[in-house]
Amino acid sequence: MEPNISLVAGLIADPARSKMLMALMGGKALTATELSIEAEITAQTASSHLGKLVDGELLQVRKQGRHKYFQLKGQHIAVMLEQLLVITSLSKPQTATGPSDPRLQFARVCYDHLAGELGVKLYDALVSEDMLQDMGEQSVLTEKGKKHFTSLGVDVAALEKAKRPMCKSCLDWSERRNHLAGSLGKWILDFTFEKKWAERDLDSRAIAFSAKGLKSFRETFLINPDVQN
Amino acid sequence: MEPNISLVAGLIADPARSKMLMALMGGKALTATELSIEAEITAQTASSHLGKLVDGELLQVRKQGRHKYFQLKGQHIAVMLEQLLVITSLSKPQTATGPSDPRLQFARVCYDHLAGELGVKLYDALVSEDMLQDMGEQSVLTEKGKKHFTSLGVDVAALEKAKRPMCKSCLDWSERRNHLAGSLGKWILDFTFEKKWAERDLDSRAIAFSAKGLKSFRETFLINPDVQN
DNA sequence: TTAATAGTTCGATGTGCATCGAAGCATAAC
DNA sequence: GTTATGCTTCGATGCACATCGAACTATTAA
């Protein structure tokens, strides 16, 4: 008996719910009211939607005082949503008109790693510096790469042993090129926030780099500054 | 402007349409009437659904005489549907009751490669025979593996150069283990049909092995016959 | 030609469900 | 205590759309 995918698809199919899911792709847990604003609906309607999403195991919820914090239930969900984004952006007539938020284009969070123009640049830089070997959907760190990241404080051996792949490549829906996902991708994003080179935008998946932070980021990961911004 | 995934999701969300899509996961092109039977709806309704699926670029259609043959528009679509299957089977209460077609469980087509119990066994055998090195979501052929498949007639060098990854691992929704996808996975399935070890079931994704064919398959790919069937 | 099959278009029907107002409950602030 | 905020339940409304019968076009068979 094959599982019935129409149930899960139905959950994503509603515009309000899909807006909520997209907002949660930022990786941050959000409250019910925040999500209702994101989806441009009233709190009552949002409550109903969120109940269904939790029921369908797309979201998990954590109660904290009078707030309820929602987030994606796991990697699987994020991966599948990104897949849907890829398909949609491929089938769309090139998004045609619409200026498209340039900040999203430049750097955004893809669940727990960096995506967008800067994410792609990072990937390319690591490859051209011989730190990463491009192997299609998954890549491997070279000896040079291992040394570099070890010097930055990464426990490479631990990441290699872990179940989650270290250097998965993730297809970027805006750039249609690979960027770096996996546990190393997550580490880089965490590192970026920790060093205060950038911070999450409050109400979107965009990442706001400071001028200084962007410079440090480029230097650390050896990205040539041929970017206009 | 983020693409709106709710449109594509909405196409999959309808039970009749999702049944059609699942039927097309078998990789074979099917006519409109065949799909209407699969989905248990009238021809009129099916026509409307198929129009929407083609419009939404999930399917492509080829006219031949008075027939119309439909198939999935490409790898992307198949990959995303399989993703949805994984999520659904994970969230489901273990499918609980329901005997579940044992033939599907044992061996089935996953778009263009072999899945199910036998697919997983194949993957494990290749790994334990040191022909395939498991690297998470993608794997690589060892020297021994390259020799073995070359002796079977595979142009390994050509597959390695091709854009499509040769040895992608694909998560199996019924076994929840990896099986072999990618161009090598496709080659093995094609080879199996070519040698007449098995044939596609007429009206499902199941693969019917002959007793002799199964024996040859096991010998060729060095699978220990510890399978009950 | 006539008859059969494959697929489509149109119109009518019915239903599932998103939406919000109003009221209710819980927690936090004052 | 009282008031404010976050979230939920209930009920009413309205719309989108899946469904099928009937009639129509196109291709193949006889």
Image (cartoon, coloured by chain):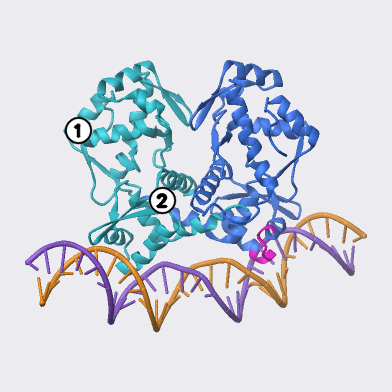
Chain colours: A cyan, B blue, C purple, D orange
In the image shown, does A73 or A79 lie closer to the viewer? A73
Label 2 marks a residue whose chain is: B
In the image shown, does B157 or B84 lie closer to the viewer? B84
Quick check: B155 above or below A2? above
Query: Decide: marks 2, 1 in contact (CB < 8 A)?
Result: no
x and y percentages locating residue B66 in the rendered image: 75, 55
Q: Is residue C19 left or right of residue B151?
A: left
Quick check: B70 above or below B136? below
x and y percentages locating residue C25 in the rendered image: 27, 73
Instruction: Give the image quarter of residue A121.
Output: top left
Label 1 marks a residue whose chain is: A
Q: Is residue B113 visible?
A: no
In the image shown, does C30 or B68 lie closer to the viewer? C30
Q: Which residues are magenta?
A: B38-45
Of the 4 image quadrants, the one containing the C terminus of chain A is: top left
x and y percentages locating residue B108 in the rendered image: 67, 42
Q: Is residue B217 left or right of residue B13?
A: right
Cα separation between marks 2 and 1: 32 Å
Q: Which residue is mark 1?
A: A195
x and y percentages locating residue B116 in the rendered image: 63, 41
Q: Is residue A160 left or right of residue B154?
A: left
* Callout 2 amino acid: Pro
Instruction: Give the image quarter of residue A78.
Output: top left
Q: Which residue is mark 2?
A: B3
Q: Main secondary structure of the magenta part?
A: helix
Kindly identify which numbered label has been placed on residue A13: none
Residue drawn at x 60%, y 56% is B97
* Callout 1 amino acid: Lys
Residue drawn at x 48%, y 29% is A136
Quick check: A24 above or below A134? below
